[in-house]
Image (cartoon, rainbow, N blue to C red):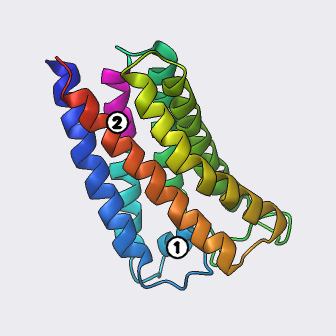
Amino acid sequence: MIPRWSATASAATGCTGAAGLTAAVATSPPATYVSESGVPGAPHAGLYAASMLFLALSLALLAIPARRSCWLIAASLALAAPLAAVSSAVHCSPGCPLPPYESPAPRDLVHAGAAIAALLLCALAILLYALRPPPDRWTGRLGIAVAYPPLLLSAAGILFAGRSLFTGVTERVALVAVSAWVVLTAIRHSKRP
């Protein structure tokens, strides 16, 4: 009963976090990083921070039913949760400077490092689901098809283009794809006996 309740709560908090993050980012120019919405003084900084906390909670709640599939999946989601929370609590400097094209402050590195590590752990969870037998395999393969392309393009944009329209758009698409995968996975777990 607890795994089903946790899965349902994960889906609800994931939807809330994704909707809030979308609203927080909606008014920012598409060539900016998503994290710039969380800089103190930004119009929706509080909404950004709260939304990231909801997404972190969603990951933590999803780790509970994921244990039934594989302890490594559960561990990767459980580790991603506090990292997502750190990316909410430690905001970046105005402009969210990132290497190799800009000079970041230490807090920029902490923020970006936590966010990137959380996404990498989510990508690992997706891959591990894809390697499981059915019905988990479908969940993982869907994640690979939907989330991996924008995640890879976003990483390439950060490394090879820096701040640009390409990077801003692919980062937004990647976050939507990963959030949607988390919600869908939580819904699938909530329907299991």
Question: Callout 2, which amino acid?
Answer: Thr
Q: Where does residue 156 sit, x and y in percent of width and height?
A: 76, 59
Q: Where does residue 30 sit, x and y in percent of width and height?
A: 56, 81
Distance CA(mark 2)–CA(mark 1): 31 Å
Snapshot quadrant of residue 8: top left
Q: Which one is nearer the viewer's eye here, 147 or 75?
A: 147
Q: Which residues are magenta?
A: 57-66
- Residue corresponding to mark 1: 39
Question: Callout 1, which amino acid?
Answer: Val
Which comes before the other along the chain, label 2 or label 1? 1
- Mark 2 vs mark 1: in front: 2
Residue at 81 percent across and 61 percent down: it is 159
Q: Residue furthest left?
A: 1
Rendered position, 146 above or below 63: below
Q: Where does residue 129 sit, x and y in percent of width and height?
A: 48, 25
Left or right, residue 47 beside residue 172: left
Disc 2 secondary structure class: helix
Left or right, residue 82 beside residue 190: right
Label 2 close to label 1 by CB (< 8 Å) = no
Which of the labelled discs sits on residue 185, or is there none? 2
Rendered position, 158 above or below 89: below
Disc 1 secondary structure class: loop
Left or right, residue 169 beside residue 62: right
Does residue 57 appear in this view? no
Residue at 40 percent across and 23 percent down: it is 136
Disc 1: CA contacts within 10 A as few (<14), some (14-19) or many (>=20)? many
